[in-house]
Image (cartoon, helix red, strand yellow):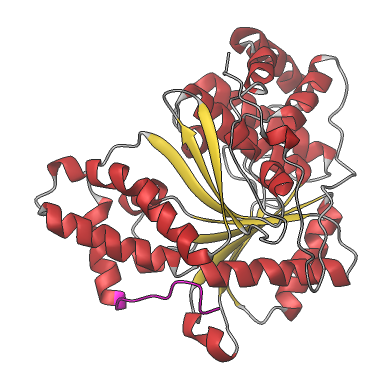
Amino acid sequence: MTDYPRAGYSINEVRLAGEVIAGDLRWSSATAETIREAFHVANNWRDAHAYPMRSVRYSMMWFMRHHNIEGLTAARLKRMQAIRRKLGRLPYALCELQDLGGCRVILPSITDVRSLVGLVRDRSRHAIRDESDYIKRPKKDGYRSHHLMLNFRGRGLSAVHDNRRIELQVRTRLQHSWATAVEAVGLFRGEDLKGNKGSEQWLRLFKLMSAEFAVAEGCKEPPGVPDHSTRITEIRELDSILSASATLQNMSHAVRWTDIAIPPSSPVRYYLIRFDNANKRVQVEPYFAPRRAVLSYDNAEAMDNQSGQETSNVVLVEADKIENLKDAYPNYFGDVQLFKTQLNRILKGRDVEEYTVAPQETVATHRPRENPDLSWFRRRIRWS
């Protein structure tokens, strides 16, 4: 626990730092030194969520293990550019953001989602600040997942992190394939589709596909969609206009290259993913120690922070296996195969099929040291 960053500034200092970084830095009246200090404070505040984030993820793994729920977990610290956009868009202070640390759980079915959410409500020691059931009430763009906003509650030495806010996302594989496909296509096209900015036709296609996914899971459809027959016709028309299926197939040949060398005696816990927007390349760096991982994350974002521009996409992810990294964050690797498979089923006149097999995750009390198979991850391919 002592290897994790702690918050080193007052709430008021964090609030003021958020006000500085929220605006357009190119036109800011703040001095360069003030801006640098603001990012230093903001980074420290975000990084102080690493231990609470890890603790929440391990709690989910414990629940899953003891209640025979198969699935996959991962976690990430929010990107600074995403933090800045959120501060500029919403009336919240930096210290009030609820997703600086995010934990993701991907499960086979709606039944599993409801079971795990029920366990969190009834048995988690972390306080639930708020809930957003986007499965029961999908967002207008079609996003579906169950979010729980938690206040971390520590024990013993970990109580120093009390009240750090962690967002827990619990979703099915079908919902996960949709959400990560939106992000992957946005990266591929250089558009913020996740933020509802960019091609109206792609956004419409995703919304209609979300409705089909909801029907397959016996859930409520997003608002403003036509009936099943009409939207199938529209999906086919949009696929023809966008060459959507072919585009998704091309994205499967995304750049994936790394020079990772992981000694068997040193289990990796963190992965720094760098996505080069200009060259459509991705690189992954493994880290064993939390402090080194978050420091590298801060340094990787430093140039964009100072310029106010977003030239790269960097994220720090916690996962138990490198194979799980790709399953939990396929958008960074152009892996949209699950979504593409469902789109092709619709184009062939077949119904969407709910996934019944989840990524397997070993959830042991004492995890064995491992020498992961990286063969899939040692290829260097250009995006076509």
**Picture residue at 15% right of the left edge, 59% below the top:** 34
- Magenta stretch secondary structure, dominant: loop
Numbered-mark total: 0
Q: Position of residue 72 (x, y in %)?
A: 76, 54
Span highlighted in magenta in the image: 1-11
Q: Where is residue 197 in the image (x, y as percent from the top left)?
A: 44, 31
User: Is 352 located above or below residue 138 in the figure?
Assistant: above
Q: Where is residue 31 in the image (x, y as percent from the top left)?
A: 9, 54
User: Is 371 located above or below residue 195 in the figure?
Assistant: below
Check the picture and name the quadrant holding the N terminus.
bottom right
Whether residue 120 sits left or right of residue 129 in the image: it is: right
Whether residue 83 sits left or right of residue 68 in the image: it is: left
Whether residue 346 sits left or right of residue 168 in the image: it is: right
**Picture residue at 73% right of the left edge, 19% below the top:** 230
Check the picture and name the quadrant holding the C terminus.
top right
Q: Where is residue 284 in the image (x, y as percent from the top left)?
A: 56, 42
**Picture residue at 67% right of the left edge, 28% below the top:** 208
Residue furthest top in the image: 240
Q: In which quarter of the image is residue 231?
A: top right
Residue 89 visible in the displayed image: no
Q: Does the magenta stretch include residue 363?
A: no
Q: Does the magenta stretch include residue 10?
A: yes
